[in-house]
Amino acid sequence: MDNGSAQPIEKVSIIVSRGSLEGVYPGLIMANGASMEGIEASLFFTFFGLDAIIQKRMNSLKVATVGNPAMHMPTLLGALPGMSSFATSMMKKEMEKLDIPPVGEFQTKPRFLNRTDLKQIRIQSCGTNMMEIGVMPDESINAESADSCILS
């Protein structure tokens, strides 16, 4: 029964299932913001989102230009050779201006380590998906591997 007073949020789980640059950053930024507010945050990486925690792939994520309505350009133009690389370069330059770190740095060197009120961001990967794509646990950053893809 609601007595009219809102309960503070204590935990948040964010699922990252897209491996494009614009698909990974929202989860990272929201988890960081939650942590800064004293909320326990958990990032769960599954399917294509796993690219963001695989060491050899995390710093080469690209912007999806084909079939991305937010690009505000015809799909045919997005399919031109080099367009994804160009859009990725532009996005990375804008993020650098805003002092937003690269994906790998975001996850391995938190920006706010000196804050005493910062809660740890828990990083989990779907163990089933990791096995499906042939990635060994030592190939990813310090992510807990869930035995299944069910969040507890």
Image (tube, rainbow, N blue to C red):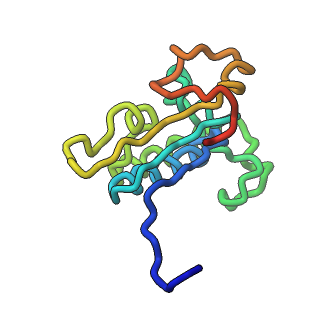
* Closer to us: 25 or 120: 120
* Closer to us: 148 or 83: 148
Q: Is residue 83 visible?
A: no
Q: Residue at x 58, y 40 (%)?
A: 44
In the image: residue 48, left or right of residue 116:
right
- Report x, y in % for residue 141: 47, 24
**Total number of numbered labels?**
0
Looking at the image, which residue sits at the far front? 1
- The quarter holding residue 111 reads top left
When the figure is inspected, residue 122 is found, relative to residue 134, above or below; the finding is below
- The quarter holding residue 33 reads bottom left
Looking at the image, which residue sits at the far bottom? 4
Q: Residue at x 57, y 26 (%)?
A: 145
The image quadrant where one finds the C terminus is top right
- Report x, y in % for residue 83: 65, 42
* Closer to us: 27 or 37: 37
When the figure is inspected, residue 106 is found, relative to residue 33, above or below; the finding is above
In the image: residue 17, left or right of residue 111:
right
Q: Residue at x 52, y 28 (%)?
A: 144
Q: Residue at x 45, y 25 (%)?
A: 142
- Report x, y in % for residue 24: 56, 44
In the image: residue 71, left or right of residue 93:
right
When the figure is inspected, residue 47 is found, relative to residue 15, above or below; the finding is above
- Report x, y in % for residue 87: 58, 46
Q: Is residue 151 visible?
A: yes
The image quadrant where one finds the N terminus is bottom right
